[in-house]
Image (cartoon, rainbow, N blue to C red):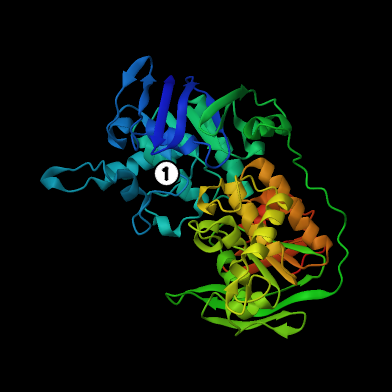
């Protein structure tokens, strides 16, 4: 099936998310939609899927104009979507999930589960998915759950499949398996729209590439284009993609964690007896698929988790049991994984956000009075140093782009007398140019003798920054390995397999 989008425009108030976008996907083609988070890719696909209504433009399938009032219309027309966050009911079986919303009944109005099972088996056998129709979804690995999503779409005769950031929750091996599945679907005549911001995946699987920046199509490329060429299209300028850093010069253990255990609010063991140390002048990167205890680990280091056991020592002083303010005052810098929720106050100015960690004393507060001149001087200095693109220090931080917001967080955290830096998902939702800058600043902190813990689900980022890599799976440490460990080894570890390489620590 041939898909055409002509002049699609979608606005949200004053924000133009899609600006007269044209896109053609030919039958049996993998067409990659490449762009940074916030570029408008997902909005465009939500228009295609009937979740949003376009303000202007047309959707055509095999040269026929379509009008989708909702996802049901899109599905009936042959469009399926595999969402980044799966739309599955964990306590249902595979067959029950596949038939949900399209239930078939037999005599007496009973659900025809046998028909759903047969459909799952037929599609699974056709593409070699190896999915048991009677398995509970909650018992399946993430990669298999994604196959269930694909089976759902194919069971409804989808001839155009949209994959929205499909590798965000996958290990490298599961990503490779997904790529193979996409090629099989292509060979069967299915048209595929592949949304991503990961250059390596684009070049591996795409037949054609369309690049979107700030809601507009800025160019097309072949998969033979280099990473540098694609990155410059995404950002609008040349970008240095390689993190340049000298070998580490460890200066003794700065952070020592022993037997760290975290129990969450519903009583689940989310961090299980974790021990590690980070040298001063070293970056330890924590790798793993999202949801394996990394978030809770960083929150425990900052005193944000209430039910914690074990020891957390920084330069010999115990942090476990101290409050967040005491830990920050001890010299811990924290870049949270969700800057909007935990790192910034959107309605505060840039200047006000830059003093959040130090609003209780000098140099910004003296005798209970805010020192406006000092704050203004400091804010202007950091805006220049961290290249924050803003009209002024008085601009509300919520009005900045994601990359500039993240620079404000980094400027605040790196401008104190640091004895430890904890950076969780430090480049999530920022453009390639900002990633380049953020990585340089993290490496600079390490070179200044600060122990650095970087938590990232982006394996490229882990490999670029890490001196050593700690892999977590289901709340436990699978192993701690050198920073140059291969992708394949790390992928197996992210799936829970113990490392067998020399130099690995359990």
Residue 296 in which image quadrant: bottom right
Determine if residue 458 is in view: yes
Q: Which residue is mark 1?
A: 149
Horizontal side of 293 relative to 151 (left or right) equals right
Q: Residue furthest left?
A: 108
Q: Position of residue 315 (x, y in %)?
A: 77, 80
Horizontal side of 425 relative to 317 (left or right) equals left
Quadrant into which the C terminus falls: bottom right
> Foreground residue, 160 or 336?
336
What residue lies at 60% left-to-right and 59% top-to-bottom? 351
> Foreground residue, 281 or 273?
281
Counting labels gives: 1
Disc 1 packing (10 Å; few <14; some 14–19; many ≥20): many
Q: Position of residue 440 (x, y in %)?
A: 76, 51
Determine if residue 80 is in view: no
Q: In the image, is residue 198 above or below residue 211?
A: below
> Foreground residue, 443 or 491?
443
What residue lies at 52% left-to-right and 23% top-to-bottom? 29
Quadrant into which the N terminus falls: top left
Q: Residue furthest top?
A: 63
Residue 238 in which image quadrant: top right
User: Could you say whether the residue bearing mark 1 is in a helix, strand or loop?
Assistant: helix
Q: Position of residue 79 (x, y in %)?
A: 38, 30
Q: In the image, is residue 324 above or below residue 128?
A: below
Q: Position of residue 156 (x, y in %)?
A: 33, 34
Q: In the image, is residue 194 above or below residue 189?
A: below
């Amino acid at each position: 099936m041939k898909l055409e989008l002509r002049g699609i425009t979608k606005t949200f108030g004053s924000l133009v998310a899609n600006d007269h976008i044209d896109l053609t996907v030919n039958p049996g083609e993998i067409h990659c939609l490449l762009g940074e988070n916030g570029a408008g890719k997902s909005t465009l696909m939500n228009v295609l899927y009937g979740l949003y209504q376009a303000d202007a433009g047309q959707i055509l399938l095999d040269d026929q104009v379509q009008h989708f009032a909702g996802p049901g219309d899109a599905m009936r027309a042959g469009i399926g979507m595999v969402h980044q966050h799966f739309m599955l009911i964990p306590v249902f079986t595979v067959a029950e999930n596949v038939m949900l919303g399209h239930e078939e009944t037999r005599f007496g109005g009973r659900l025809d589960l046998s028909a759903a099972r047969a459909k799952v088996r037929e599609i699974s056998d056709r593409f070699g998915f190896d999915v048991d129709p009677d398995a509970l979804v909650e018992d399946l690995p993430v990669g298999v759950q994604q196959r269930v999503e694909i089976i759902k779409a194919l069971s409804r005769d989808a001839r155009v499949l949209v994959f929205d950031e499909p590798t965000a929750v996958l290990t490298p091996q599961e990503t490779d398996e997904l790529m193979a599945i996409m090629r099989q679907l292509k060979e069967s005549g299915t048209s595929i729209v592949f949304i991503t911001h990961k250059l390596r995946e684009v070049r591996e699987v795409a037949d054609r590439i369309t690049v979107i920046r700030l809601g507009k199509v800025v160019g097309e490329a072949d998969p033979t284009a280099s990473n540098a060429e694609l990155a410059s299209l995404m950002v609008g300028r040349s970008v240095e993609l390689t993190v340049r850093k000298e070998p580490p010069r460890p200066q003794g253990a700065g952070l020592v964690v022993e037997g760290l255990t975290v129990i969450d609010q519903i009583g689940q063991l989310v961090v299980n007896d974790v021990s590690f140390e980070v040298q001063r002048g070293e970056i330890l990167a924590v790798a793993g698929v999202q949801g394996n205890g990394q978030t809770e680990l960083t929150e425990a280091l900052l005193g944000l988790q209430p039910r914690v056991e074990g020891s957390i020592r920084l330069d010999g002083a115990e942090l476990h049991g101290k409050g967040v303010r005491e830990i920050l005052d001890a010299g811990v810098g924290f870049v949270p994984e969700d800057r909007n929720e935990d790192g910034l106050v959107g309605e505060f100015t840039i200047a006000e956000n830059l003093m959040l960690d130090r609003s209780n004393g000098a140099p910004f507060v003296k005798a209970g009075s805010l020192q406006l001149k000092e704050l203004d001087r400091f804010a202007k200095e950091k805006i220049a140093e961290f290249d924050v693109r803003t009209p002024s220090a008085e601009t509300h931080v919520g009005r900045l782009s994601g990359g500039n917001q993240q620079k404000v967080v980094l400027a605040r955290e790196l401008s104190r007398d640091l004895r430890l830096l904890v950076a969780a998902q430090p480049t999530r939702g920022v453009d390639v140019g900002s990633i380049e800058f953020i990585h340089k600043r993290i490496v600079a902190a390490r070179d200044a003798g600060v122990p650095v813990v970087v938590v990232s689900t982006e394996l490229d980022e882990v490999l670029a920054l890490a001196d050593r890599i700690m892999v977590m799976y289901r709340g436990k440490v699978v192993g701690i390995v050198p920073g140059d460990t291969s992708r394949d080894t790390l992928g197996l570890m992210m799936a829970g397999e113990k490392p067998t390489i020399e130099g690995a620590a359990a």
